[in-house]
Image: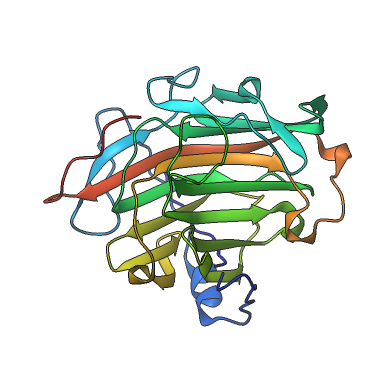
Amino acid sequence: MKNHRSKIKVCLGRSFVSVFGLSVVSLLLSISAGAQTATNSITPTAPVSGYMLAWNDEFNGSAIDSAQWGYRTDSKHLSTQKPENVSVKEGLLRLTLKKESAGNKNYTGAGIVSQPAFKYGYYETRAKMPPGAGWHTSFWLMKHDGSGTTDYQMAAQGIVVVQNESVDHASYAVKVDKYQEPAACYGFLRLPTPDLFADFHVFSCEFTPETVKFFLDGVLVETVDATKFAHSDQNVWVSSIASHMGNTPKVDDSALPQESLFDYVRVFTKTNGAPPLQQN
């Protein structure tokens, strides 16, 4: 099991709030990057007490396990997401971005969605963002209807644990969306970070009936009041698509093809809580 350190951002209403000069930045930069090697005999533990591992994928095989994951297949923003762009190699999930036409788009991206759905718990991934400009990489939680699209009609909330716009080069966002009317966005925080392209970092959140807490490399960076919106179960999403989000002027075609890398995805639930929900 590997452990590293990095940086974050979150949204309120539909406006963006930038946070600069935060003391947490110096704290994050002072944390040394450590590493632990996991074997199949070691069960990962949550850095937050009171949780046990409920579901995970360490991506140690040679392909995605279809019993655990489905594919994101929509055409959104600047790309069409293709199953062929998802691969597992050398212990990493690889989401490839390409300059090619598909679904009336000029680029292709990739994404996977967990087959099991969960609700309250601690969610974590370790990832390395792709360099360049023009792609949107995210680890987020939202109920999935099985269609491969990002339709949120079944979801009460969407929780973005990390959302990196590649043009930022050194920042990311976390946020909570309420989908019922009136729709709202809570806690959008933008935080300077170390170079997310240079190394892996750990992105995580704890979702309880009262709060959503966001962590970057184990450091708490934002807390959102979860009593302001209704709660539904949610699937785990891992995506990388071509996009103009984050005021990206254009896609850097010279950097393509490009990969987003994920070391693992883990879901922990309370040791005294209910078991995870059944698969879709």
Figure coloring = rainbow
Q: Where is 26 relative to 2, above or below? A: below
Q: Where is 61 relative to 98, above or below? A: above
Place of residue 88 in the rendered image (x, y in percent of width and height, measured from the top left): 53, 24
Locate residue 154 relative to residue 47 in the image: left or right.
right
Front-most of residues 32 and 126: 126
Residue furthest top as drawn: 62
In the rendered image, which quarter is residue 215 located in? bottom left
At 25% from the left and 35% from the top, the residue drawn is: 42
Place of residue 157 in the rendered image (x, y in percent of width and height, measured from the top left): 43, 56
Locate residue 47 relative to residue 143 in the image: left or right.
left
Residue 28 visible at all: yes
At 63% from the left and 80% from the top, the residue drawn is: 20
In the rendered image, the quadrant that contains the N terminus is top left
At 24% from the left and 40% from the top, the residue drawn is: 276
Q: Where is 88 relative to 15, above or below? A: above
In the rendered image, which quarter is residue 278 located in? top left
Front-most of residues 160 and 26: 160
Locate residue 207 relative to residue 242 in the image: left or right.
left
At 49% from the left and 49% from the top, the residue drawn is: 140
Place of residue 119 in the rendered image (x, y in percent of width and height, measured from the top left): 31, 49
Place of residue 147 in the rendered image (x, y in percent of width and height, measured from the top left): 52, 29
Front-most of residues 27 and 120: 120
Q: Where is 44 relative to 33, above or below? A: above
Residue 200 visible at all: no
